[in-house]
Amino acid sequence: MNTEYFIAGRIAIKSERTFSKLIVRIAIAGVMLSLAVMMLSVAIIKGFKTEIQEKVRGYIGDVRVFKYDLNNSFELSPFVPAKETLAQLKNNPDVEFFQPYATKPAIISANNEVEGINFKGIDKTFNWDYIRRHLVNGKVIDFTDSVKASKEILISQFTANRLKLKVGDDFIMYFVQNPPRKRPFKIVGIYDIGVEEIDKNFVIGDLNIIRRLNNWKANEIGGLEIRIKDFSRLKEVSTHIYENMELKLKSESVSDYFPAIFTWLSLLDVNTKVLLVLMMVVGVINMVTALLIMILERTNMIGIMKAFGMTDYSVMKIFLYNAAYLVGLGLLLGNILGLGLGFLQKYTHIYKLDQSSYYLSYVPIELHLADVLLLNLATMVICVLVLILPSMLVSRISPLKAIRFK
């Protein structure tokens, strides 16, 4: 029989001392709360990054390819992509899909209000999956009828609210050029991305409108939006695309197009690390304090065990077993609390956010088994290793003095 383990179990579970029970409960609660907070912190930060990245990249793609020139306006210069460029993108295993687009500044006039926007022109090859997920009302543009499609447009909920528009309404759009030219449009859909930089500045329409207004050729475009399969390899894939395209073209990743958003997201990683360290310190201090109090409370028992011939190492093992049990129980309860709250939020979105400030209307949760296991393992290992030092206090306890101690 493992004597040290048996005695540790008696101390931790069957102790009749009220003060010991209180210390045990406090220690367990400290580890439980620390783990739950760390788990939720990692899940929320990862959820934020994934959701906001998906919002931005879903609308403008991961990599944008356009003509290399001195044009710094929102209206891109036209070009015809070479067959080699299209073949290279099509055969690139890292590319999920790509689609042509063009932009042109314009002004919407409706209900005695005006709003400056960028008209984003797309064609029948456009992937509507992302927009459909964010449609508030209506439908997407139907390109099976080219005449009808040229008069249809999608606007954001932000623009619709400002101009008091709804699905089915007509309005006039004035395109910025010399001389300005106007076109009538009918709203077929309203979407809500939740990112003000997008919702405030863009509407979606037919690419052929821009071609006709700018006198472009039928196959000329303003740029290509490229969606890659693994966003974590964005920089590497973006560089590879740039190195293998025509000399007249250049590329820009989504992180370069929206530097403020991605800088903010990178700072979240720093916040997560700081929070993890603080919560780990809180848990460790709580366990060290509990173990020291338990050792001091059991001074008389330690003296008796030493008097019967038990070594300092064996006594240390008793309290380390005890500490491991407390940490283990705390981890179990912490997992129940952390995962319970995480799944509750993931499937109910009970905790809401101000979308104008956080880009999201609810607190996002992204739980990964690897993160949960790593946090549990790290907490257990760090706590047990740190507790070795205070457990060495038993070696300084004299059996004679300890037995007399009351």
Image: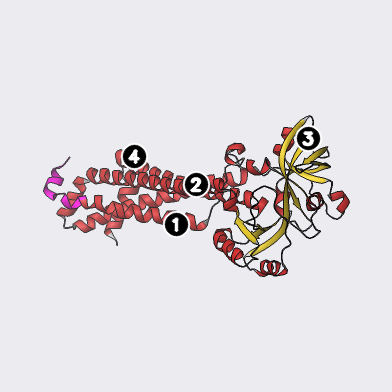
- Tell me the CA gap for discs 4 and 2: 27 Å
Q: On the rendered structure, is 314 left or right of 24?
A: left
Q: Which residue is mark 3?
A: 109
Q: Quadrant of the N terminus?
A: bottom left
Per the image, label 2 sits on a secondary structure element best described as helix
Decide which of tag 2 and tag 3 comes sooner along the chain.
Answer: 2
Pointer 3 local density, CA inside 10 Å: few below 14, some 14–19, many at least 20:
some
Per the image, label 4 sits on a secondary structure element best described as helix
The residue stretch that appears in magenta: 393-406
- Tell me the CA gap for discs 3 and 1: 56 Å
User: Observer-nearest residue: 195 or 27?
Assistant: 195
Q: Is residue 153 magenta?
A: no
Mark 3 is on which residue type? Answer: Ser
Mark 2 is on which residue type? Answer: Leu
Q: On the rendered structure, is 258 left or right of 171?
A: left
- Tell me the CA gap for discs 2 and 3: 46 Å
Decide which of tag 4 and tag 1 comes sooner along the chain.
Answer: 4
Q: Position of residue 61 (x, y in %)?
A: 65, 55
Q: Which residue is mark 1?
A: 374
Q: Residue at x 27, y 54 (%)?
A: 388
User: Observer-nearest residue: 311 or 260?
Assistant: 260
Mark 4 is on which residue type? Answer: Leu
Image marks 4 and 2: residues in contact by CB distance under 8 Å:
no
Q: Position of residue 84 (x, y in %)?
A: 69, 70
Q: Which residue extends farthest left? A: 400
Q: Which residue is mark 4?
A: 22
Q: Residue at x 45, y 48 (%)?
A: 270
Image marks 4 and 1: residues in contact by CB distance under 8 Å:
no
Q: Which mark is residue 40?
A: 2
Residue 150 can be seen, yes or no? yes
Q: Quadrant of the C terminus?
A: top left
